[in-house]
Amino acid sequence: MEPQRRKKVIISGGGPGGHIFPAISIANALRKIDPDTDILFVGAEGRMEMEKVPAAGYRIVGLPVAGINRKNILKNFSVLIRLMKSLGIARRTIREFNPDVVVGVGGYASGPVLRQSAKMRIPILIQEQNGYAGVTNKLIADKASVICVAYDGMEKYFPAGKIIKTGNPVRQNFDNLKDIRKEALQFFRLKEGRTVILILGGSLGAESINRCLSGNISAMEASGCQWLWQTGRLYYEKITKETAGRISENISVVAFIDRMDYAFAAADVIVSRAGAGTISELCLVGKPVILIPSPNVAEDHQTKNAMALTVRDAAVMIPDDKVGNKLVNEAVNLAADEKRRIMLSDNISKMAERDADIRIAREILKLIGK
């Protein structure tokens, strides 16, 4: 009897961390279900995935693909040359690896890989993280076998018969936040019995949020709340200089938070950007959230992500250009309004999707079975 051929899967995409983490999470889930699955990543040269994927223990091939320059059309000649090269490398990689299924998670590299996979009649699974479909995923949707989504109403963009609502893969399910609240407060040197407002602008930071808080220190101090403020690595030095001598122990300024479980456990109100992966985590956390969509993302995805929650009274949204006038007051008012906090918590918790990585992995294995 011949030995059974190992299952082979290519996972393509990357760029921002919001694409990379779900991709690695799906790979880990595949290995959890079937440890012999052979997985190859395809990413974009010079992007974060070329570092993060090998660190997670997986092989990766880099494509020279780049995004379209919308500000300077003339610069797109080199983008087209890179795309042609990437299509060639993608085709060669697919032939050599010979995958059973190709998974696209969004980002620059997924386009060439999905296009070539469709031409070669290899089953495709798309994982769309946002409430608004990306260009690459919309273009390839007709060729996909399965489209895994995180939001309702995605039949506006994709064939309804191919859609499966799985949610977005996240770091963990955050089921133990109540149990670890006391140690979380101790970890950040926060006092029990006083409201905690957690400010997140992403790992690099958000200029509008940092500028607003730096200019409203007196209002933050007068609020009686405790503030856990992640500035992001890009802004930490600047903010610590600007706030030197103006803040008390009620305001904790940190560059980056490694223990997000502790941060979520300590928080009573959370202020955050509206990336798809972040929102999926916040639904699992189940605490009142103020979302500030980043204006610096393709097709204004984050606003559409945030609106998917606000229409259900599951979050508050403040546009980025209104942050300076509204953020601190909105956060303080929400912290003081227990009835509204409970409503927001209940509604955002109803939107939580658990074990998305395992569900997506099972859909991949079903395609291999066919």
Image (cartoon, rainbow, N blue to C red):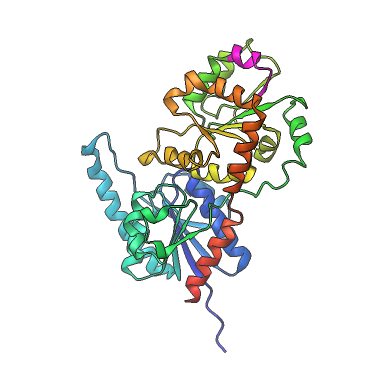
Q: Is residue 89 magenta?
A: no
| Rendered position, 236 above or below 140 | above
Q: Considering depth in this image, is 250 or 10 the residue closer to the camera?
A: 250
Residue 251 position in % (x across, y down): 66, 20
Please tell me which residue is depicted at 40% across the width and 61% down the height of the picture: 160
Res. 216 image quadrant: top right
Residue 272 position in % (x across, y down): 54, 33
| Rendered position, 122 above or below 61 | below
**Is residue 265 something that shows in the picture?**
yes
Please tell me which residue is depicted at 29% across the width and 55% down the height of the picture: 85
Left or right of 368: which side holds 259?
A: right
Residue 330 position in % (x across, y down): 55, 24
| Rendered position, 42 above or below 236 | below
Res. 313 image quadrant: top right
Residue 57 position in % (x across, y down): 58, 56
Q: Considering depth in this image, is 255 or 367 the residue closer to the camera?
A: 367
Farthest-out residue, front:
339
Q: If the image is split into quadrants, where does the N terminus sit? A: bottom right
Res. 27 image quadrant: bottom right
**Is residue 35 something that shows in the picture?**
no
Span of residues in magenta: 217-227
